[in-house]
Each structure stands twice: as C-alpha cells, then as structure tokens.
Amino acid sequence: MRDPLLDISLFRSRALNAALLNGTLIALVMGGAILPLLYFFQNVQGLKPVPALLRIVPMVVAAAVCSPFVGGLVSRHGPRRVILGGLALIVAGCLGLSFLQPETPYPALLVALVLIGAGNIAIVTPVTEIVLGSVPAERSGSAAALNNAAMQVGGALGAATLDVATRSVRLP
C-alpha cells in the first residue's frame, strides 16, 4: 500500500518507541491512581461520589496551571530533564499518598495531588513533543494518534490493574 494509515516503519525510531512507552507507563500510573483515590474518599472517608471526585480536581488544575511553563522548560533544559523532573514530582506526590490513613486531612492529600498533577504535565508535554518530532511532518497525524492510543491503553490498564488490586484488599 502506497499510503498506509499507520506506517509501521515509524517504529524504527528509538525516540518514538521510548516516548510511547513513557507515555503509556505514566498514563498507567495516573489511570491507576485515580480509581483507588476515589475508593478511598468514598469507602474510607465516607464521601459521596461527586465530593470524592471534586477532591481529585486539584490534580487537573495543577496540570493546567503548570502547562504554560513546561514548554519553556523544555526549550531551556531539553525534554529529558523536564521528564525526569516530572517523574520526581510524581514520586514525591505518590510518596505522600503512600502514608494515607482514614484520618489523613485533605490539605495533606492536596499537596500530593498538586505534585502529581504538575509532574504529569511535565511528562506528557515533552513526550508529545518527542513523538511528533521523531517522525516526518507528513506522518505527524499518525504519530499523534499513536501517542493518544498509547496513553489511552496505559490509562485503561492502570485503572483495571489497580481496581482489581484495590478490590482485593479488605478494609477493617
């Protein structure tokens, strides 16, 4: 076929493959983190579904607030350093969440959620830039679709995996 929908030769690029893997894994972590947090807010802290969901919104707000700055950071420091910084933020946020107790006050959770949201955008932006920059311009649509598919698969796998793991844990 002269003009395939997805040119398999795109996968010859190590940068593309590494970026897609990174995007898939970060989406797996993010997708997997949200569902157990919702369970925590509802089943442990006794919140209704909407208030529980609203407690996760700061993660998205932090990503939106940090988004305009990430492009400049990538220009000044390169994508690798920004991605590593984003990973460090996510690790710090997840470390904070690892000490959750039923009586953990929301402000403590809020700090962790903001770190995770900021770290997520610090990874997603340069990963997308790497994906799009690693293919010829005429294949950028295919690369963008691959990036989106990788993140969707990662998010779905994360939610499914951690949902099963969370449901198997019995609360006292």
Image (spheres, rainbow, N blue to C red):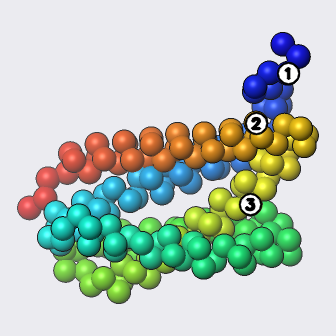
Instruction: Residue at 88%, 16% (x, y): give it.
Output: 2
Q: Is mark 3 on a helix, strand or loop?
A: helix
Q: Which amino acid does label 3 sit on?
A: Pro
Q: Which residue lies furthest to the left in this view?
A: 172
Q: Is mark 1 on a helix, strand or loop?
A: loop
What's the CA distance linking mark 1 and mark 2? 11 Å
Q: Name the residue under label 2.
A: 142
Q: Which mark is residue 46?
A: none
Instruction: Residue at 22%, 47% (x, y): give it.
Output: 167
Of 68 and 80, which appears nearest the observer?
68
Q: What element carries label 2?
A: helix
Marks 1,3: beta carbons within 8 A: no
Q: Earlier in the sequence, mark 1 or mark 3?
A: 1
Judge from the rendering whether residue 45 lies leftward or rightward of residue 13; answer left or right.
Answer: left
Which corner quadrant of the image does residue 98 belong to? bottom left
From the viewer's perspective, is residue 2 above or below residue 77?
A: above
Which corner quadrant of the image does residue 20 belong to? top right
From the viewer's perspective, is residue 56 above or below residue 137?
A: below
The quadrant the C terminus occupies is: bottom left
Of 110 and 80, which appears nearest the observer?
110
- Residue 14, position in %: x, y? 81, 40
Marks 1,2: beta carbons within 8 A: no
Q: What residue type is labelled 1?
A: Asp
Give neighbour class at mark 1: few <14, some 14-19, many 20+ (Cα, 10 Å): few
**Residue 40 shows in the view:** no
The quadrant the N terminus occupies is: top right
Q: Mark 1 points at which residue?
A: 3
From the viewer's perspective, is residue 33 above or below residue 73?
A: above
What's the CA distance linking mark 3 and mark 2? 17 Å
What's the CA distance linking mark 1 and mark 3? 28 Å
Q: Mark 3 points at which residue?
A: 126
Of 151 and 97, which appears nearest the observer?
151
